[in-house]
Image (cartoon, rainbow, N blue to C red):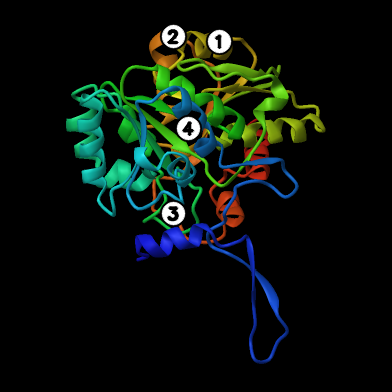
Amino acid sequence: MATRLEGARCREVSMKSVTTTPSSKPRLTTSAMIASIASEGQRTKSAPFGHALVELARARPEVIGMTADLGKYTDLHIFGKEFPDRYYQMGMAEQLLFGAASGLAAEGFMPFATTYAVFASRRAYDFIHQTIAEENRNVKIVCALPGLTSGYGPSHQAAEDLALFRAMPNMMVIDPCDAHEIEQAVPAIAAHQGPVYMRLLRGQVPLVLDEYDYRFEPGKAKLVRDGRDVLVISSGILTMRALETAKALADDSIDVGVLHVPTIKPLDTETILREAGKSGRLVVVAENHTLIGGLGEAVAGLLMRSGVHPAFRQIGLPDEFLDAGALPTLHDRYGISAAAVATQIKGWL
């Protein structure tokens, strides 16, 4: 199994590297870990979280940055360079990271604590549960490599983080789509009094939602695109894929609407019920998370309890340990690439 250091280093490997063999010319191979989830030619923005946190901290002296040996790999190093006296490097000790964050919050600080999503959700869950959530401490937990955004195998793939944090009392859960939303989410979660878990896209992050005049609001779902045939209810990078799918299926005269749900908890029940309750549309929930316990089951439960019964399908990761490999291959294999999403939707109509 990969060590954390090896995994962190792999995050910086470029999408393609040159290899040679004694009997062949140099050839290009795809890295198992890709520094960006952006498609070729897609607009991106560098380190939106790190830059947004710096802007927030200039106006909020209580904001501090904390990490567990992953400042560079969560874009927190940008904050550390700007505010070295407010930056805490806690070493490879997530339990210590979150325990200290809770203590600092109790003294009036607002810690933004970063690590990989697997380490927060699996390794330090009890410390977050007991010292942050139960005490309702004002700690913002911001975690990279959510869902299947790492090709480094189960040790680094946080396929179940939303399910775990959804079940934690007092915890707000955010799954942003792109750089535009991350920039807006940072000051918004700072304005929320209480603990927040936010998934993080880092490095060169795609820009998508700025084309739709989108504005992030905690606890609010937004209809980014309307459609008469299908409604995709999505979060995170699957909203990006859903919008790509909608454009592709328009060529087949299939009209796809996209309802972006960045706040997994608390759920915007009013908007979801209104849009899912419109007759004649297939409702598909798409998420970068296991099919168990995430947005799909949250929406399904809401619809059942409310007596709203559209034709309903889910797109998400299977209930299994996922393979290691190149992200484009894995996204196709597990059904969350734009092409795979389009194929599934066409098959259901």
Q: Position of residue 278 (x, y in %)?
A: 60, 10
* SS class, disc 2: loop
Residue hosting label 3:
322
* Sequence-first tag of 1 and 3: 1
Q: Is residue 299 visible?
A: no
- Pick the residue in front: 28 or 139: 139
Badge number at residue 53: 4
Q: Which is more N-terminal, label 2 or label 3?
A: 2
Looking at numbered disc 1 in the image, what kind of residue is underneath it?
Gly
| Local secondary structure at mark 3 | loop
Q: Is residue 32 visible?
A: yes
Which of labels 3 and 4 is toward the front? 4
Q: Is residue 341 left or right of residue 236?
A: right
Q: What amino acid type should be assigned to the residue bearing mark 2?
A: Gly
Check disc 1: other Cα within 10 Å, few if <14, some if 14-19, many if 20+.
some
Residue 277 is labelled as 1
Q: Position of residue 125 (x, y in %)?
A: 24, 39
> Is label 1 or label 2 in front?
1
Residue 215 picture location, percent across and down: 60, 18
Marker disc for residue 307 = 2
**Quadrant location of the N terminus?**
bottom left
**212 in relation to 122, above or below:** above
- Which element carries disc 1, helix, strand or loop? loop
What separation in Å lies between label 3 and label 2 (alpha carbons)? 35 Å
Q: Amino acid at mark 3?
A: Leu
- Which is closer to the viewer, label 1 or label 3? 3
Label 1 with label 3: CB-CB less than 8 Å: no
- Of the pair 43 and 304, the residue shown nearer to us: 43
> Secondary structure under badge 4?
helix
Q: Are marks 3 and 2 in contact (CB under 8 Å)?
A: no
- What's the mark number on residue 85? none
